[in-house]
Image (cartoon, rainbow, N blue to C red):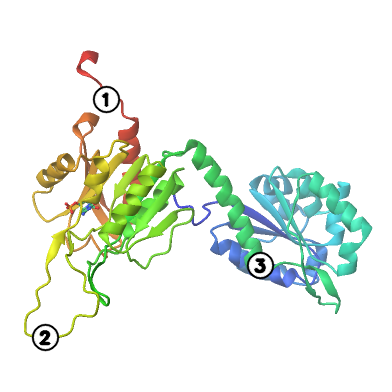
Amino acid sequence: MSFDLSVIPHKNIILAVTGGIAAYKSAILVRRLKDAGFNVRVVMTDGAKAFITPLTFQALSGNPVHTDLLNPEAEAGMGHIELARWADLVLVAPASCDTLAKFAAGLADDLLSTLYLATKAPVWVAPAMNQQMWAAKATQRNLATLIEDGVHVIMPDAGSQACGDVGLGRMPEPEDIARQVTEYFHKAQRAIAEKFGLLAGKKVTITAGPTREAIDPVRYISNHSTGKMGFSLAAACYAVGAEVTLIAGPVSLDTPNGVKRKNVASAMQMLDESMKKLDDGCDIFIATAAVADYRVAQVAEHKIKKAGDELNVALIKNPDIVATIAQQEKRPFMVGFAAETQNIEAYAAGKLVAKKLDMIACNDVSRADIGFASDENAMTVFFAEQYQLDQRDLEKASKQEIAQQLVEAIHDALTHVVQSEDDF
Ligand code: C5P
């Protein structure tokens, strides 16, 4: 099972290409759909073959191109009914006037029109034609029928046309069509996650990255945290139905799809934003941030000038964000992280109790192959005593895989029925 909503795993698209000059754009569309993670099979009408060759689409899609309805050889490979069942979406781009008319009338005299009747998958059409043909009453009547029949129409763009006319009828750019198709599957996937995902409906707040503690207007104290673990966890929580907010220190990472993000610099700002999220409602708080333990007592108003051989800057302790949140009355399920070089178990257990956490994930930073800037991690997870769950060793894996296992651990603790002694 994949938790990554940034690509569409294993969804099958039939791209049907009909006769029109816009067929050249369909070649790029195949590429964009493949880039997004779709399996693509191309169906071509006779008209399409006058504009572009099946070989082009075969090479781009990596699959044989389907052109005939009554060809025994092709039917022996993947027949029209099998093809109709294979599709998770049928995308007709460009869709000619003739194809729209056939669909509206329910004809089945070639492979595409037969496929249209034989599939249960959603059908999308991207009409492309001369502006006068688009405006023709018969075309508009057919379109209205198709919309009523549940077909999704990607409206044509306006502009100058291959025939020299100017007006509505240009097929939208392949990138735009591929984006719309991807968004459709993301929404569908998200709807399932919101209903059935491990953290369906849970509000999750995650602190991530380093904090930056100003010394003067141009200098600061910080650390090497990249924020990768927190961002991977945000994506993993979102993928299983949670509503996720990242409170991120200064990092150079893209916000995962669907996740809300609040940027902060200092530990005090991170605490402020965390408290606000608590007021908004928070079910699970995950503290992955490498918060600076100390901040500068008196931040200089102006740049400190070079003078003498020594410079003393007084530091004062920053509040412990995760411990502060854990002490609040409306306390979420609290997850902390710890980086240790020795006595991992003892230190982790100590922090679990001292910070009043429900769960702590601990990694051994003395190992050179995992940790801060690495794409991989290995962790041991400990649960608070009341959950009666054994510690879990998460073997070295990508931060995404570790994130998924942490999500499962959180879910297990949240759903674990704590048995009282009377039950025995
Ligand atoms: O005490 P230590 O820094 O090892 O604890 C690490 C855990 O506490 C992490 O989950 C970190 O995000 C959190 N923490 C915090 N605020 C601090 C220091 C640490 O939330 N000021």
Name the residue that disc number 2 marks.
307
Where does the image place residue 78, in percent across and percent down from the top left? 67, 51
- Within 8 Å: ligand 1 and the Cβ of disc 1? no
Where does the image place residue 343, in percent across and percent down from the top left? 8, 49
Q: Please, what secondary structure does the residue beneath circle 1 have? A: loop
Q: Based on the displayed image, in which of its 4 quarters is residue 289 positioned?
A: bottom left
- Going from N to C along the chain, the mark reached first, 3 or 1, is 3
Q: Nearer the viewer, residue 18 or 171?
A: 171
- Going from N to C along the chain, the mark reached first, 2 or 1, is 2
Name the residue that disc number 1 marks.
418
Q: Amino acid at mark 2?
A: Ala
- Going from N to C along the chain, the mark reached first, 2 or 3, is 3
Residue 230 visible in the picture: yes
Circle 1 packing at 10 Å, graded few (<14), some (14-19), many (20+), is few
Count of numbered badges drawn on the protein: 3
Is 395 rendered above or below residue 389? below
Q: Based on the displayed image, in which of its 4 quarters is residue 282 positioned?
A: top left
Q: Nearer the viewer, residue 153 or 323?
A: 323
- Please, which residue is most extreme toward the front here? 301
Q: CA distance from mark 2 to mark 3?
A: 61 Å
- Within 8 Å: ligand 1 and the Cβ of disc 2? no
Where does the image place residue 312, in percent across and percent down from the top left? 9, 74
Q: Please, what secondary structure does the residue beneath circle 2 have? A: loop
Circle 3 packing at 10 Å, graded few (<14), some (14-19), many (20+), is some
Quadrant where the C terminus sits is top left
Name the residue located 70 percent from the left edge and 70 percent from the top edge: 25
Q: Amino acid at mark 3?
A: Pro
Name the residue located 25 percent from the left edge and 41 percent from the top edge: 326
Q: Nearer the viewer, residue 170 or 16?
A: 170
Name the residue that disc number 3 marks.
174
